[in-house]
Amino acid sequence: MERLDKIISNQTIYTRKEVKELIKKKRITVNDEIITKSDIKINEKKDIIKIDNQVINIKKYIYLMLNKPKGYVSATTDKLMPTVLDLLSKEYLHRNLFPAGRLDKDTTGLMLITDDGDFAHNMLSPKKHISKTYNVTIDIPITNEMVLGFTKGINLSDGECKSAILKKTGENTGIVTLTEGRYHQIKRMFGCYKAKVLELERIALGNFYLPSDLKQGEYREFTNEELEKVLEK
Ligand code: URA
């Protein structure tokens, strides 16, 4: 059971103060009865809240898939650059959303944005081995040495040895699958072969692939089936 004003301010663009105003104007009903107090307790599973006769769809958590464009940082705030949250419409901004995982500023593609800390923790935990798949273009041809080296593991500058699956798809293009995401991992792995990453796009999280109709800068909510695919290995 939760207070009416708290629920409405969590689930809509209205602040608690505005909820009070709406109540005064008799614009809010619970189970079709006009409400006169903002602190009444609501059973989120049963009670139907309406504002101006529109049902408020109560969602405990939000899970968004975003096709990240270049130029946005994967953070909730930044002093200089726009963040991925700047791409979202006002209806989401009263929730404490954050990107689950990071893509570099110049990397594009699939990001999951949520306010469910447990889900994000689960998804990002190295123990879960959730894979992340990228389309990559580099400045020189992809060699067999790189393909073998990625599988065997490469010693990165911080002393860690990291492996990944690299499949060549064209002269300078490939698909890379990681199960751990270290800072700039793909760029650093190619850097060991004096190769520069020109384009990097995340195309899948677990078994969930970026939908082809989701253009850069666009986002939508995940369905339950899609979320399950994210957690599939
Ligand atoms: N590896 C990188 O180098 N950059 C990314 O954004 C993701 C993986």
Image (spheres, helix red, strand yellow):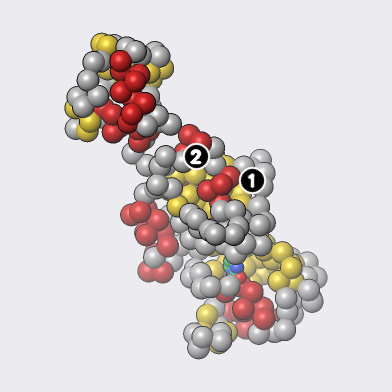
Residue under pointer 2: 221
Quarter of the picture containing the N terminus is top left
In this view, the residue in front, 131 or 125, is 125
Of helix, strand and loop, which one carries label 1?
Answer: loop
Discs 1, 2 touching: Cβ within 8 Å: no
At a point 28% along the width and 29% down the height, the residue shown is 5
Which circle, 1 or 2, is nearer the viewer?
1
| Pointer 2 residue Cβ closer than 8 Å to ligand 1 | no
Up the image or down, 203 lies above or below 182; here it is above
Alpha carbon separation for disc pair 1 and 2: 14 Å
**Callout 2 amino acid:** Glu
* Coordinates of residue 193 in the picture (x, y in percent): 70, 84
**Callout 1 amino acid:** Gly
Which quarter of the figure has residue 189? bottom right
> Can residue 153 be seen here?
yes
At a point 33% along the width and 54% down the height, the residue shown is 118
In this view, the residue in front, 55 or 154, is 55
Report whether 185 appears left or right of 147.
left
Residue under pointer 1: 217
Report whether 185 appears left or right of 38.
right
